[in-house]
Amino acid sequence: MQRFLPESIKKYINDKLPYDTLRYRFAKGVFWTVAGNIIVAVLAIVLSILIARLLGRVGFGELAMIRSTVEIFGIFAGFGLGLTATKYVSEHKIKNVDKTGRIIGLTNILAIITGLTTTLVLLLFSTYIAKNIINAPQLINVLKISCILLLFSTINGAQYGALAGFEAFKTMARNSTVISIVSFIFVLLGTYRFGLSGSIIGYGLTSVFGCALNYSSLKKIQKSYNIKTNYNEWRKEIGILWKFSLPSLLSNVMTSPIQWVLNTIMVHTPGGYAELGLFNAANQWRNSLLIFPRWVGQTVTPILSDKYGQGDNKSVKRLVLINLIINLAVVAPLAIIILFGKNIIMQSYGKTFVEGNTSLLILAVSAIFLSIQMPLGHTIAASGKMWIGFILNGITGLTLIALFFFLRGNGSLGLSYSYLAAYLLHILWTIFMTRRTINIKKQQHAC
């Protein structure tokens, strides 16, 4: 990180960020997060614009529906294993290498088992889902093709979780950049040649490539820690599935599948897929705004878990505050730029997308709200109180569905307003529960 800097600057950095301190670990993680995700975010936006122009507004809506359907199956396939790996690898990688090896073995094996199971379920029920749920019988074959994306994305999730637990942020940034470049090439060529089916094939091939790359990286990092993946005694750690993975899964069930339910509601309204395509274009920018906070979250969560394990309540509060300030410092200015350039942005997708500029404005503001909530959510996850996270996400998800059900006649605009209101409420009750979580931890260590 400092290799090419002048000696005077190196000295200043070393004075301000002593090695292996909380500040050093956080700064190192954030640096590589930013470095990798600038490229990732730019490529994702450019790719979405090019795909939208190739597929058109309805086709872009169909792509969003297919991907959200894969994501909902992916939540169950993932079983919260990525976050489980992050938390427990972070806590035990130094003090108990044998336990760490068993945990990695557990998450890897279960990722393959759950990935294969849910892939088979999607394959068997793809015809029924396309005809009766997502109102698109023409998408049956595309949904079947997406099974390859589901399987390897599940395995990727567990691998990324372990890499985050090792705080291998430089490796993760490099891998994300390479995978994004490969995705750009595969998906764009696939879409140009085969349309919507080609898009899904491109995403599927990218997930296969990413799985191989992450496997290689994880193997090297484990070797540096003298940790061997234990596939023989992983059953000794199965208790963490009920303590952490299951509530993590249920918490995720209240996020990504909610988007699928919302999409399903929309596609059953007149012109639903066209409205979904419009929302998907605007939502790409909300997701891009949140790339940085999400990856910083992967940096923060293992450090928070470590500090919680030590009972260092002061460091937990300081880290959450730093995370909050950094999120706002990055997301808010970018959101303001999007607000002023919303007309140009939506025109870039094509003439039929221009009317989505108001949706883009609302979703950009909602991203600011969510960037405030995220550090608080990481605190709950790091404390191991995933049942609280499940309850909070459940309330938010049900609120969002209820709001959009009444506003569904407004299409993309109605869904955008629903997100804005739901996120605002989510911030309020997350603040309340986070304060209780930290105070409880403080009382426990005082005793």
Image (tube, rainbow, N blue to C red):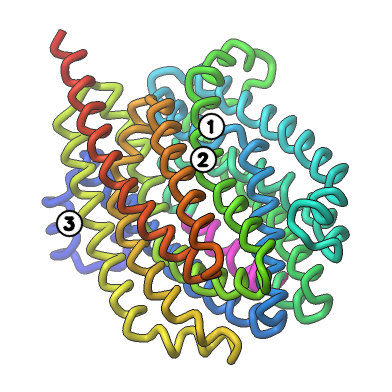
Q: What is the magenta range? A: 173-186
Q: Is residue 175 above or below residue 240?
A: below
Q: Which residue is mark 3?
A: 13
- Identify which amino acid the numbered label 2 is placed on: Met
Q: Is the magenta region chiefly helix, strand or loop?
A: helix
- Identify which amino acid the numbered label 3 is placed on: Ile
> Disc 2, disc 3: CB below 8 Å?
no
Q: CA distance from mark 2 to mark 3?
A: 42 Å
Q: CA distance from mark 2 to mark 1?
A: 7 Å
Q: Earlier in the sequence, mark 1 or mark 3?
A: 3
- Identify which amino acid the numbered label 1 is placed on: Leu
> Residue placed at 61% from the left, 41% from the top?
75
> Disc 1, disc 3: CB below 8 Å?
no
Residue 341 appears left or right of 354: left
* The C terminus lies in quadrant: top left
Q: CA distance from mark 1 to mark 3?
A: 42 Å
> Residue placed at 60% from the left, 61% from the top?
179
For label 1, the SS is helix
* The N terminus lies in quadrant: bottom left
Residue 331, picture quadrant? bottom left
For label 3, the SS is helix
Residue 181 part of the magenta segment: yes
Residue 24 appears left or right of 362: left
- Residue 325, how many percent across, how many down? 20, 55
**From this viewpoint, which residue is outermost toward the top?**
447
Instruction: Decide if residue 8 is in sight here.
Output: yes
The image's mark for residue 254 is 2
Residue 408 part of the magenta segment: no
Q: Which residue is mark 1?
A: 250
> Disc 2, disc 1: CB below 8 Å?
yes
Q: Is residue 421 above or below residue 396?
A: below
